[in-house]
Image (cartoon, coloured by chain):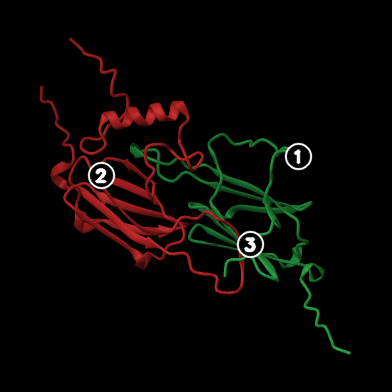
Chain colours: A red, B green
Amino acid sequence: MFVRRVWPSRPTFEGSFGEFDQIRREMLRLLGTSGGDAGAEPGAGVFPPINITQDDDNFVLRAEIPGIKPAELSISALRNRVAISGKREIPREHERVSYHRKERPEGAFNRAVTLPVEIDAERVDARYGDGILTLTLPKAEVAKPRQITVKP
Amino acid sequence: MAREASTDVEKAEPSNVPAAPEQTRTGPVYSPAVDIFENENSITLLADMPGVKASDLEIDLRENVLTLTGRVTPSGTAKESNVLREYRPGTFFRQFNLSEAIDQPKIDAQLTDGVLRLELPKVEKARPRQITVRSA
């Protein structure tokens, strides 16, 4: 008998991003209570916001961190955990200026995410451009799915 | 020294600006976080627009309304499936009313690592003059 899986309808994350978190995000999104930064995906509320995608071989992590020097970012990876930390400083305008608006956030940040499978920490690739940090995290060989051929 | 902010720069309110044309692209529209400050010579605007390339950024100033539009092209390939999604690429859009006369040909815009720095120099006549009082 085939059992149709209705839920989860999308790939879920074992570990820190469980199904409940996913449901909570969806609920908040429906209610439109993103709070603060209009239009931001709810549930995060932390800096920087992170998107993670995967294909067969890699996870790709993208984080919106505008206006930081790559040297001020610290990235570490161990087994199935990736941590990003750094400090965003907005240089002072030392001339005599009067501020009308000051909305851009600054300060130290620190985020760690747990991935569903182990990654090959040696081959992690990090790039920074246009305010987006992109980490390519290759899945560890042992974690890759094997194709199994059925013999007649 | 913190000087009291004057009202030279105001966010364009719906009441005093004709309604902006609707976006033709679907997807979310974000209001970028900005810092705005001014000195005697110019107004400077800094805006966080992560993911916007210089070619996808439009800056428009007409009838004292400054319009910033930055488009983000979604990154990634079709093969990738979402694991965690905290932000959605969209369009950055924000408008401001500028009351000071701006020297339009001298406007300078720079986009570095997702941060726009826009220098809006004031025209000569809008700059404050120091008037020295001579004693007779």
Task: Name the residue that disc number 2 marks.
Answer: A57
Residue situated in front as seen by the camera: A45 or A17: A45
Residues behind callouts 2 and 1 on a single chain? no
Q: Secondary structure at mark 3?
A: loop
Task: Name the residue that disc number 3 marks.
Answer: B4
Residue A124: quarter of image: bottom left
In the image, what residue type sits under mark 2?
A: Asp
Quarter holding the N terminus of chain A? top left
Residues behind callouts 1 and 3 on a single chain? yes
* Image mark 3: chain: B
Task: Name the residue that disc number 1 marks.
Answer: B18
Can residue B47 be seen here? The reply is: yes
Q: Residue at x 46, y 40 (%)?
A: A40
Looking at the image, is mark 1 or mark 3 nearer the viewer?
A: 3
Q: Whole-Å distance between the Cαs marked 2 and 1? A: 51 Å
Can residue B80 be seen here? The reply is: no
In the image, what residue type sits under mark 3?
A: Glu
Whole-percent x, y for residue A110 in the image? 30, 54
Looking at the image, is mark 2 or mark 3 nearer the viewer?
A: 3
In the image: residue B85, left or right of residue B56? left
In the image: residue B30, left or right of residue B95? left
